Amino acid sequence: MLSAYLTVLGGLALLIFGADRFVLGAARTARGLGISPLIIGMTIVGFATSAPEVLVGSVAAWEGKTAIAIGNALGSNIANIGMVLGITVLFSPLVVTSKTLRREFWLMCIAVLIALSVTLDHYLSRLDGFILLVCLIGITGWVVKLARASSATDPLMGEFEKELESKKPIVTSLFLLFAGLALLLGGSVLLVHGAVIIAKSFGISDLVIGLTVIAIGTSLPELAASIACVIKDEADIAIGNIIGSNMFNMLMVLGVPALIQPSGFSSEVLYRDFPVMIGMMILMGWMVFIHGRGKFDRLEGGVLLACFVSYQFWLFHSIAA
């Protein structure tokens, strides 16, 4: 068992380190190709921050553990809102000023509804995976259009320009990109392998292991990135990363494993996990864009974190029962 725990820890370490390299390499490569910083931030960075979940889900599906991928997609979204955003705001209150993020939030809601609609039959087929990926392409195009239409005075534009300002040659950026991808793949294999062994030893289902250990692990890069953004006074990027990552998780992290290994799943996904995720998404939107009108204080961050911790207790209590 000790080797399984060490395997999980090694996988998490590779995921965290590799995710940072991959995101940086992808963003700098796109910048070197002349792509707008706002488009990079709203699409490429969102894709890159979901890379750990995609690779973990793909490896799990390849090994016939599609339930891990489903749990990872939903659990990562819950962790992004409850753990990542909650801890980030406890670390430092946020002030969101970008109008573009309000529109992207609604696109995230659409992505969640699409994912929910294809899972109502308790089965993820290859057709469902295809539908999710086609919708991903459509929503990404919508985000690009939104980014192009956004005013140059939008604070998000300035934050991304400052963040992506780099004199590094494109060869260096490509090296970071592929090195990060290799680390992510290696970390994914180790994490899934170790997590499956631990889950079997404790009698935990693949779904729950995906919703807990793996979801938290794959969300750690977002936590590190969000805290770094707050330190740099880039609150809009911190919120944007979470919204973008959640949107990609719903369409890509569910879609790719479905193409690899279609599978049914337990009813808890629809009656427990989807409602929790949707509820926390609505709570985040209300806190950020309505109640505080862009101001997000420590009390609200504490509420989100408390919701996340309560959900984790609920999951483990259901195991014990």
Image (spheres, grey):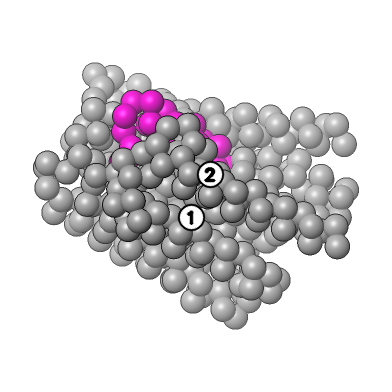
How many angstroms separate mark 2 from mark 1 (CA)?
24 Å
Res 98 seen here: yes
Judge from the rendering whether residue 198 lies leftward or rightward of residue 292; answer left or right.
Answer: right
- Few, some or many residues within 10 Å of mark 2 (<14, 14–19, 20+): some
Residue lying farthest to the bottom in this orientation: 121
Chain-order first, disc 2 or disc 1 = 1
Q: On the picture, is 27 further left or further right than 22?
A: left
Is 97 inside the magenta-drawn segment?
no
**In this view, 107 is above or below 37:** below
Q: Is residue 237 magenta?
A: yes
Residue at figure coordinates x 42%, y 28% from the top left:
228
Residue 119 screen position, x and y as percent: 56, 74
Q: Do the CB atoms of the residues marked 2 and 1 lie less than 8 Å apart?
A: no
For the residue marked with disc 2, what is the amino acid? Gly
Q: Is residue 277 above or below residue 243?
A: below
Horizontally, is 6 left or right of 98 in the view? right
Q: Quadrant of the N terminus?
A: top right
Main secondary structure found in the magenta portion: helix
Q: Which mark is residue 302?
A: 2
Check disc 1 and give the amino acid type: Asn
- Circle 2 SS class: helix
State the extent of the magenta-drawn residues as a range: 218-238
Q: Quadrant of the C terminus?
A: bottom right
Query: Which of the 4 image quarters holds residue 107?
Result: bottom left
Which residue is painted at 23% across and 27% down in the image?
Answer: 162
How busy is the neighbourhood of tag 1: few (under 14 within 10 Å), some, or many (20 plus)? many
Tell me what residue is drawn at x 39 percent, y 65 percent.
109
Work out whether residue 69 can be spotted.
Answer: no
Q: Where does residue 159 sit, x and y in percent of width and height?
A: 24, 34
- Which disc, if any, is residue 249? 1
Q: Secondary structure at mark 1?
A: helix
The foreground one among 76 and 28 is: 76
